[in-house]
Amino acid sequence: MIPLPFLIPLPFALVMLCALVAPARAARRLGYLGSLAGAATLLLVFLSYAGGTGTQAATWTWFGAAGEQFPLTITLDALSLVLSGIVSLIGVAVFLYSVGYFGDEERPSDLSRYYAILSLFAASMLGVVLSGSLLQLFVCWELVGISSYLLIGFWHGKDEAMRAARKALLTILVGDAFLLAGIMLLRARYGTFDIARVLALARPDTLTLLAAIGIVVGAISKSAQFPLHAWLPDAMAGPTPVSAFLHSATMVKAGLFLVARMLPLLLLVGLSPWLAALALVTIALSACMALVETDIKRALAYSTMNQLGFVLLALSAGAVAAGTYHMLTHSMFKALLFFAAGIAIHATGTQDMARMRLALGANALAIVAGIGALALAGMVPLSGFFSKETILDALVRQGNWTIVACFMLAVLLSAAYIARWYLLVFARGGRDARAPWQMMAPAVGLALLSLAGGLAMGKVFGLFGEAAPPVLTPWTLLSLALVLAGFLCTYLSCVRGWAAWLPGTALASAARARFLLDDLSAGVARAALGVARACAWIDGNVVDRAVRGVAVRMGALARGARRMQTGRVATYAFAIVAGFIALVLLLGALR
Amino acid sequence: MLSLLLAFPLLSAALALLFPRRARDIALAGALALCALAALSLWSFSLATKGFQLLERIAWARLGSVEIAYHVGVDGISYPMVLLTALLTLVAVLVSRREIHTGEAGHYALLMALCSCVIGVFVSLDLVLLFACWEAVLVAMFFLILRWGASNRAYAAMKFLVYTGIASAALFISLVVIAMATGSVDIAAMDLSHLSPALRTAIFALLLFACLVKMPIAPFHTWLPDAHVQAPTAGSVMLAGVLLKMGAYLLLRLGVGLLGDVVAQWRVFLFALGCASAIYGAFVCLAQSDLKRMIAYSSVHHMGFVLAGIAIGSSLGVTGAAFEMASHGIIAALLFALAGLVHERTGTFDMDALRGLAQRMPRTAWLLALASFAAMGLPGMTGFVGEFMILVAGFARFGPLALLMVPAVLLAGAYVVRMLSRVVFGTGTLRASEGGASPLPFGLLAAATLLVGIMPGLLIGIIAASTLT
């Protein structure tokens, strides 16, 4: 009997097989199947969690060699429960949304490929968040990375998409190499892949510190944190449901999941301040870039970086429950915002926010997008408000006032950039956006969840065995005031035209130049290519030349030796006599 | 059983020469029968036996005190190689059907003879028989490149012959020294432990040189890209798939098997050499603009991992190396077969000219993507399992020094992604279609890498049946 948790990735895996063999006429309907699979997965997750008490683990030996075991372990605890819930729930919405998103211009074979890879992603993402062994984590982690590459490059005829896909995969591969090194060092140090055992055995020594650094680098490359974040905005070249599913709601959470999972080890070796620093830098840079971005999806990508930075900040303070809760609410409102962006792009045919001119008012799109934006800003009583407050509470209790002050500033900035995003898209015109029900229904559903997300706070903290922090504190009121201040700033500068000098400042120009970090990563890639070209040159002009040189020398030697064969009797007679004399002398000398 | 596996390809080679008009069908029938025989032999191979089995021995000749015999047998290291040779021979015959139109009889006869000799190398338990097969392989491949190769084939074939011939000379000397020192050429019963350390080191050094050239390991690898680029597709499939493995196999059989303490002394050097070769090979791959040349260099990269695994020397390391040998055999063969198909349809290996392959030949392009992912070690395919075992064994043996292997893993991803972005994707002006190409050889190999990649226990179970693992 296969343990129930092992069945959790199964529905999506089955959809993948279906998509691979599906006839062309069924390709468009695969999205419904995927949606059903998401629902089935959700059911399985809760059934297997309700089936036991507390943390459950099930191990299966994938293979064994030379007495070593290579096990896959499914662990179902509070963290993985919430995250697998996110994957399956957003999965339901995204598969349905895809049906409406892809029109008739896509070929059925391309759609089958899309659904196959999307299902592969969902199944392997579940594998990541459920993994109790580092081996399984790495296996699924790699599969997630490849599916991200193939999905960003879904329109493989578009050079922009392929460049973005390549950039994303290469950045993630750098992280993967670090993660692999970290996993291997832990395996060598503690002799096991099992995460629970590693955490139990962990000691603060150099090897563990090295491993922890590897794990953190792997995590930040996947979660698009500074300085390995430059791939995420480019990844928006992929289809919008992919941006919603992979690049905001789930895949980019994998890194944070890893940090949360390995947190005891990371804190043990003293990485907490470093995590906080990375998070703060990410938050600051991404907020600035979001404030100057004109592309509707790229702006959302920066805000994803920004919000993930909040989660990383919470984790650096050891607040796993608060971080996980923010991951949950963020998935809902950010997927919602991407869904809205997709509808807006479909309706207007542009991704430039300044030219969208959509109607503000009593239409469904403006309302659901508004709910998403307010939730992101952290407006009471939407889900984002509660999750942000729990992070704030954790930071206050940690007692580092610099970090708290930075967080307050970040709250103001995130309210400002999302308000700007909303006002740019909606407040300037009267165009109406219509969308098929398959696109609108998921957006409305997520809007409802974003409205009611605050109710889940107690439940999520309960899963972690903690009490939810109090909602109404002076800090809460202060942050709420900052949210309103953020709104006000945006209103004054965007609508009333105050502070027109602001886009001309050095900071704004630097943000528009993406702080040159894109150029930095491009420079690293160029340098690697330069080394490669040098190696190829050495290969032809040094290594192989030496080989050819030996051959040429041997040829010359042979030609030289040939001269001895003159064919004249006199020469040979001389050689015979000379040789005889030499032999006699030699024998005489030896005697 | 093994004699049948040896004799059957030879028989079909002879038949192909006798009936030149039906040569291609005779070769196909012979390859299919060989695969069937190889599959049947699985039933007689016992997974529980550690050491040689399916033994056959016929006394052959006597040179002084040295008794030479026809002595064959397999263990967990050589048996997967025999199976791989059978599979790749079928693939080579299938891909030749579209590509070879001149001198068919000779081509198929050579190909089948090559197959027989390669199997001979893997099953020989007698040094003389082994060396005879080793040299015959060289000759058969020389003529395959020389007669059916591309435009610069004479240079490549001669370079291959001379370079690996020098390696064979080193091997020959080391084998003669072994025979003279021990008075025996029977691998199964050989014991070199009573020889003086200096002699053992000398034997190992010669053997190592021969194997490094054959595998090949940088800086002894430059014959490989030329041979591959000029060889016909079938030649490349066999060359990358099984011929390179002969070097690694011999290093395992004679090096780790008989001179384990010398390997242990040289361990760190060999490990660093393997890693350096893998990293160097990957960097050179990254700079290539010729598809076939890139695939050729990827062999240098992967065989570097095999050398690292052999150098680690623990049972897990050797298992990983043996797994990686089989895995690379499948993946490299698939890559070369696909490159051959692409060349046949487009007339070029130039990556920039091939841009946008996915739009013209989608099935081929996605198979190429799959094979490339396998080459970069994506989980779910064989490449991952072998590398992962070698990594685990390496970190267990060397600790942080094993971090050397990590850049090699990363760079494999880099060159694969660069190749895919240039060849498979994007929009280009390519004119080609893939109608009519038989998917059988590609499907076989892709299925093999997926099946063994998802259920590695199938192969590891066989590999475990050896005293080395």
Image (cartoon, coloured by chain):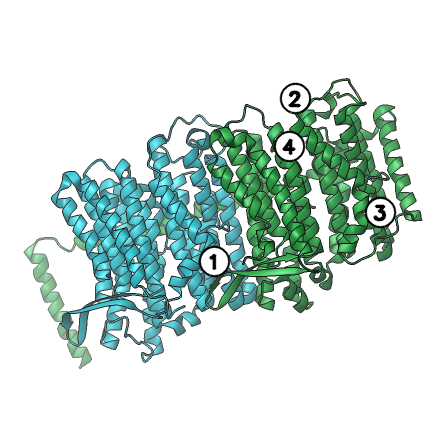
Chain colours: A green, B cyan
Residue A145 seen: no
Q: Which residue is mark 2?
A: A349
Q: Which quadrant of the view contains residue A13?
A: top right
Q: Position of residue B141 (x, y in %)?
A: 25, 49
Which amino acid is tagged 1? Answer: Cys
Number of numbered discs: 4
Which amino acid is tagged 2? Answer: Gly
Query: How far apart are the two marked residues, 3 and 1, measured between alpha carbons?
Result: 50 Å
Query: How far apart are the two marked residues, 3 and 2, measured between alpha carbons?
Result: 38 Å
Which residue is rendered at x = 21% and y = 52% of the image?
B9
- Residues behind callouts 4 and 2 on a single chain: yes
Query: How far apart are the two marked residues, 1 and 4, measured between alpha carbons?
Result: 47 Å
Q: Which residue is mark 4?
A: A97
**In this rendering, the label closer to the viewer, 1 or 4:** 4
Q: Residue lying at the far bottom in this picture: please name it.
A: A591
Q: Chain of mark 4?
A: A
